[in-house]
Amino acid sequence: MTAYVIRRILWFIPVLTIVGLITFTIAQLTPGGPFDRNPEEGRRMNPGTERVLRARFGLDLPQWRQFTRYMFFDIEKDAKTKEDKIVWGAIGGNLGPTYKSQGRRTVQQEIFGSSGGNPSSFYYSARLGLQAFLIALGLGIPLGVLAALKQNTWIDYLVLFTATAIYSLSSLVLSFILLLLFSSYLGWFTIIPDWDDPIRPWILPSMALGLASMGYVARVARASVLEVKRQDYVRTAQAKGLADMAVVWKHIVKNAMLPIVTISGPLFAGLLTGSLFVERVFLVPGIGNDFVTAVGARDYSMILGLTLLYCFALTIASLVVDLLYGVVDPRISLA
């Protein structure tokens, strides 16, 4: 088990490198740059100032050098000792300075640091993602199991239709529907959220994000339970006179959890690291909103840092899922 975990962790390095290279290439090919305009005045920055800033952040270096110094390490002169020192990059946990702050704040400070007494961007995205994840599993699994146990009845058709319709709408469309219905039409929630309120502003974005994923979870749970229902050991348990509820929970639901565990890891990672559309629609000050702002400002370090953060969360979730396989199904060995 330990050797397996170590091998998987070592694989994180090439995975993050490839993702970083693709993201870096796309960002560099996109027209514009981080210092094209003065962020305070909204007009073209002085060419001399732009050259100084580009040199300060290494944007005048060859692109291969920019990538390696950001991802791996760079050798710089120490300001006090004048000796060479190694400055680690993203692989060492240093995601670099943000260009919008002209180096006054790092990407880590923007993501994980509080500002003006308010929680960090990661807090908003993590709380929203966790609430949406609980909604997706808390509703999706029971509905999927119920639909499978009531196969070819009106309950099955209703659950399947609802799950398919909600999943097809996507979280973006659901966000607008919920906002228009409950905020504009019914007036139960304000369009401009007050994040000092610990409950009300979280309800609609959590529902929009969680319900879209709930449709997918319900369909997977239904398909998995239907497959397990047809297994010989289930018919044998029923033939022995075992109570229906015991057959359902001990034999069907327990053995149908493997596909649900499989999708739960990537689903949790995706929800935890923020949703671009939901955060934008409901004005959630999370990292998804930061990513959209960074793309518009060509803040390369922020774009790369958030992409690598999402990739890292996804790989960790994948590893946790693989480790959970052995718990759910003892027949699986991770040698």
Image (cartoon, rainbow, N blue to C red):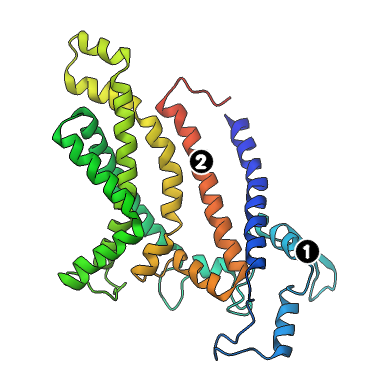
Q: Is residue 276 left or right of residue 91?
A: left
Q: Residue at x 62, y 67 (%)?
A: 301
Mark 1, residue position: 65
What kind of residue is marked 2? Ser
**1 and 2 marks in contact (CB < 8 Å):** no
Which badge, 1 or 2, is on the more N-terminal residue?
1
Q: Quadrant of the C terminus?
A: top right
- Above-or-below relation of 131 to 137: below
Where does label 2 land, which residue?
318
Where residue 172 appears, x then y in whole percent? 35, 61
Query: What is the count of numbered marks?
Result: 2
Note whether 88 is above or below 58 in the view shown.
Answer: above
Q: In this orientation, does residue 94 appear? A: no
Q: Position of residue 22 (x, y in %)?
A: 64, 56
Q: 253 or 30, which is in the foreground?
A: 30
User: Residue 197: which numbered mark, if any?
Assistant: none
Give the residue drawn at x 79%, y 76%.
79
Q: Residue at x 28, y 50 (%)?
A: 166
Horizontally, residue 269 falls left or right of residue 195, namely right
Give the residue type that dot 1 points to. Arg
Is disc 1 surrounded by few (<14), some (14 to 19) or many (20+) residues within 10 Å?
some
On the image, which quarter does residue 58 sit in?
bottom right
Q: Position of residue 6 (x, y in %)?
A: 63, 37
Front residue of 152/246: it is 152
